[in-house]
Structures are given as C-alpha cells and as structure tokens.
Image (cartoon, rainbow, N blue to C red):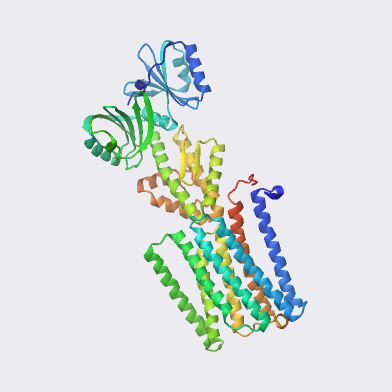
Amino acid sequence: MRFGWNANATSIRMLGAAILAALLFLTAYTFIFLVEPFTDRWNTILINSFLVFASSGAAAMATLIWRRYDPADAPRRIWIYFAMGLWLWAAAELTWGYLNVTQGEVPEGISDLFWISAYFFFGYALFVQYQILAHPDRRGSWRLIVIAMGLLLALYLIVYSMLTAGIGAPVAFGTSVNAFYPAADLLLALLAFWMARRFRGGAFSRPWFGLLAFSFADLLYAWIELSGLYAWSVNQSNALSTLTDVVYLSAYLVLGWCILSQWVFMKYGLRSPAASR
Amino acid sequence: MPDFAEIIPASYQNVSPGFLETLIQARREELFTGLMRLTFISGEDFLAGFLEGTQQKLYHCHGAVSEVIPRQTWRETFGRGGASVGFLPLPLEAMRFVRVIHEVPVRQIEETTINAEELADAVAKWCRAQDPGIIHIQGGQVDRYYLIAGTSTPVIEELSILGGETRFSLNDASFPKTLPKLEYHVLRYLSEPGHDLWREYELRLAFHPFMRMLLSRFGELAGRVLTERLCEQMSTWASREGWNVSLSSNGIVNRQYFDSLENATRFYVELVERFSGEARPALGARMTENILQEILMKLDSYRRELLTRSILPPRGAASESGVAWRQNL
C-alpha cells in the first residue's frame, strides 16, 4: 500500500478525504448560488457541470464495484444494473444541463427518458438483491413484481391526482411525467429502506441508504418544480430553489460516498490491521 | 472393543527401557503420527498414540477392553524391560478414529455372519438407530472398522486394514454395496450416545456442513473475493491460536485432535464468533445473525439441536460479543 498505511487506516483516510472533498464541492456549489460570481450563463454552466460531475462520479464508483466482483458472483448482477441506472442519470443530467444552458427552462423530454429508464435498472438491481437475500421461488418473484407494479401504479395515481387537483397543475404530458418521479422514488425508497434494514450496520447497506437519501431529494425537487417555485437560472434563484438544488447535489454526493464506502470495503475490508498490501 | 494392537507387527524384540526411550525419542524427532504397540512377555498389550511426535495417549488393551493409562504412570509402563515393539504410522484422522475405538464405553457386543446384501440392510438400520457403534467387518481380504454415529448421521468413517497397511476414508451408508459379495463376520460394539467422545465426534460431523453452507451463503451475499479474505482471516486466527484447522470457500478442513469435548466446543464457539465478527462489518449484525439461523434451519433437526445446544448463540445474542451466552455453556 502506498504511504505505508495499513488497510484499516487507508479505508478511514480515503473515506475521510472523500467527505472533505464532498463538503468543498458542496461549498463551491452553494457559493455560486449565493454570490453569483460570474455571468448568468457561466454560473448556470458551472452549476450544471457540478451535477454532471457528481452523477458521473457515482456511476463510475458503481462501475468499479461491478468490476471488483468475480463474473460468477451473484452481487455482480446487482451492480451492473445499479451502474447502468446511474450512468443513465448522468446522461440525463448532461442533456438537462445542456438544454438548461442553451434554452433556459427545460421541458419534459429526452432527459426524462434517461431518468425514467434508469428507474427500471434500479428496480431490477433491487430485485436481484432481493433474490439473493430471500431466495424466492418463481411464484414469489412474480408476486413481488406484481405487488411492486401495483404499488407503483397506486402511488402514481395518488401523486397525479394530488398534482392536478391539489396544486392545480394542468392535465398535461409534463404533469404525467413529473408525477412518475415522486411515485417511483417513494417505491424505491420503501424497497431501499427494507434492503438497508436487512443489512443494518454493514457496509453493504450503505448504497441502499444512499438511494434513500436520493429519494428524499428527488421528492423535494419534484414538489418545488411543480409548484412553480423552481428558478431555471442561477441569477434568478430564490432561497427555496437554492435549497432544493443543494439538497439535490448533496443526494448525489451522499449516494456517491455510500457507493465509494462499499468499494473501499471491498478493496480493503476484512483484512487484519497489520495487512499492508 | 476391537484390539487394534493385534494388527501392528512387532519390529523390535526384547527391548530394554533405554532402547525404548531411544525409539520414542526418534519418533518425537521425526514428528511421527501413529501408534506404537508394546507387548510384554506376560502377554500384556499397550498401545501408545503419537501426534506429530508428541505422545497423546497410552492404552492398556485387554482383548475386548481398553483402559486409558494416566500420564503420571506412563513411566512405570515404559520402565519395564523385555517388550516387543512395533509402530504403525497413521493419518491424523485415523488417530481420532483409534481414540474413539479405544475410549468410548461398550455396553453390548453383537456378533453375526451375514452376506453383503444383509449387511446393507443392517447398516441402514444402524445408521438410523439412536445408539452409536463401532462395526468391525471381516471376510475375504476385507478387514475394516466403521464408526456409525447413528441418528442418521450421513458420514461414516472407515479404517481399512490390508496387508498390514491401514487406510482412512470417509464413507456413507451405502458402503456395503462396494464390498465383494461374500459372507462377512460382523462385530458391532454398541456404545453410549451421551459419551463425550461421541458428542465431540457428532459435533465435528455436524459443524462441517454448517460451516460449508455458511461460507457459501456469505459468498453469495458478499462475493468470492471477500469470502476468500474472510477464510484467510479465520485460518490465520486458527493457526495463531494453535488450532490445526483451515478454511476456504469450500468449507472447513478440520485436522485438529481435540483432547476434550470442552476444547472442541470452545474452538467451534470461537470460530462462529470469529465468523460473526468478520462478517458483521460487511453484512451488518442483523444479516449476520439471520444467515447463521438460516443455515441452522437447513440442517436436519438432530444436528440443528446439537449445534444450537453446543455452539450457537440463541437468536439475538450473535450481535453481542458472545461472552454472555458462552458463560452459560
């Protein structure tokens, strides 16, 4: 090992350094929102770049975990789908950022296609994890899929009716798309919470906790955007919009850190303190 | 009780106490594992067991009865001159086998002459029985001993003797099918199930599939690399503690000669604790406890009860240090 640290010290230092880097990253992001140091266009480019960087980082970490597993390992299947979902989110952030910089307000479209399809991959990753944990038979697996789909539909209808009847969003394509995120997030959060509880205290619970954090940020974002309070450019930002964006980036950072911690555990964990390889 | 001394040829005649000491010293130096037979002019037979050069046991064999000689009086036996001496190298597994043969109590001896088909039926019945026993089968070239623990224990240890050579192997209840179709003289030494040696024997046989399934489940959850690392950590610990046990993702290789049931139990308890301690950072306390219980449930009720009673913590205690429940053992 470089620097002559043992495995345990390296793990702790790496995770500590990651927290420090994330805090600096978040501070710089908030600083741009609060101080608006550059022109509106450049501030918007930077803000979006932060999101693209954070989402790509999380996706890259997930890919590294996938690579650490042996091809015959069952968890490898989880991580390929998890990484694919995150790469789709990174692609969504990139297209959304590009559209935001070039045209300001971003209508529902190609970036939503990336975001929504990512949920399929996260859902499948969770399903594979469930299969490994619970060993359900074919009937049990189908029952779970049907229950999850039913729950998703029920949540979707509730959110949709709340948006149209509750806060007066128009019955339109945009509302239909935006109603999907809170519903899918809630479902994912429930499943991730169950998963995290099963792994309570273990390094393997962290990525699911990360997903849980993301669900919260996504819900907040969906609510602000649909209530019309979301500011589409940095220089027009308000406190609530800034908070939403900071929470949203924080969720990526939390998710990234959680994934990193599993990678660090896989690389250095379960070694004796004296091991220095 | 089968007299094992009979199968060891005498290589040295009329040995003086000094020369006997030299022979023993030579075995120590070559880290000999096996048996030494001492036969005195009076006709008394003694059998000494060596494990990597260290003398473990001394038995006084009186035909069907064996008596364990306390260590303090060994000098008296070795100080007598005029013995004929023979040695039989054996693998460690066979030494454990020999120990069972010579130390478990025998409450009844059944003697029959049956053919291979009848033997297959009898073995199937003995495997299901509650009482453990030692079986000695002779016929044609066949001269074999079997340990049948009963209570449907699937593994049957076998020690075969052919041309003065012994071979240890693991078998199952179908072994009579592999024997030539002959008439066999069968001696069954019925023993007491509660004896410490049988309990240690059963514990070892039950712990083997338990550990294999446990590591396989851990591997399923955490992957091959972490499983190998976990096994490496546990093997290092076992070696550091002086236990002749190693672990791999395929399970446990137990080459330890436990001198008492307490020592064996202590080792298994500590190994499970060590597994929990190593697995917990990866899987979490709850999942670690769950997989321990889950694997336990996969065992048949007898072995589940045996391991629960002897080794495993009650549900809820696996996440603790394990000290509290161990104190009640």
- The residue nearer to you, when weighing A101 against B128, is A101
Q: Residue B174 location in percent, x, y?
A: 29, 40
Q: Is residue B19 above or below residue A104?
A: above
- The residue nearer to you, when weighing B180 against B102, is B180
**Residue B97, quarter of picture:** top left
Q: Is residue A233 above or below residue B304?
A: below
Q: Residue A11 location in percent, x, y?
A: 65, 54
Q: Is residue B86 above or below residue A196?
A: above
Q: Residue at coordinates 71% horizontally, 49% vertically from top-left? A: A3
Q: Residue A41 location in percent, x, y?
A: 73, 80
Q: Residue at coordinates 59% horizontally, 55% vertically from top-left? A: A265
A167 sits to left or right of B313: right
Residue A86 seen in render: yes
Q: Residue B214 location in percent, x, y?
A: 46, 49
Q: Residue furthest right?
A: A37
A4 sits to left or right of A119: right
B130 sits to left or right of A72: left
Total labels drawn: 0
Q: Residue at coordinates 29% horizontally, 36% vertically from top-left? A: B178
- The residue nearer to you, when weighing A178 against B65, is A178
Residue A196 seen in render: no
Q: Is residue A88 above or below residue A134?
A: below
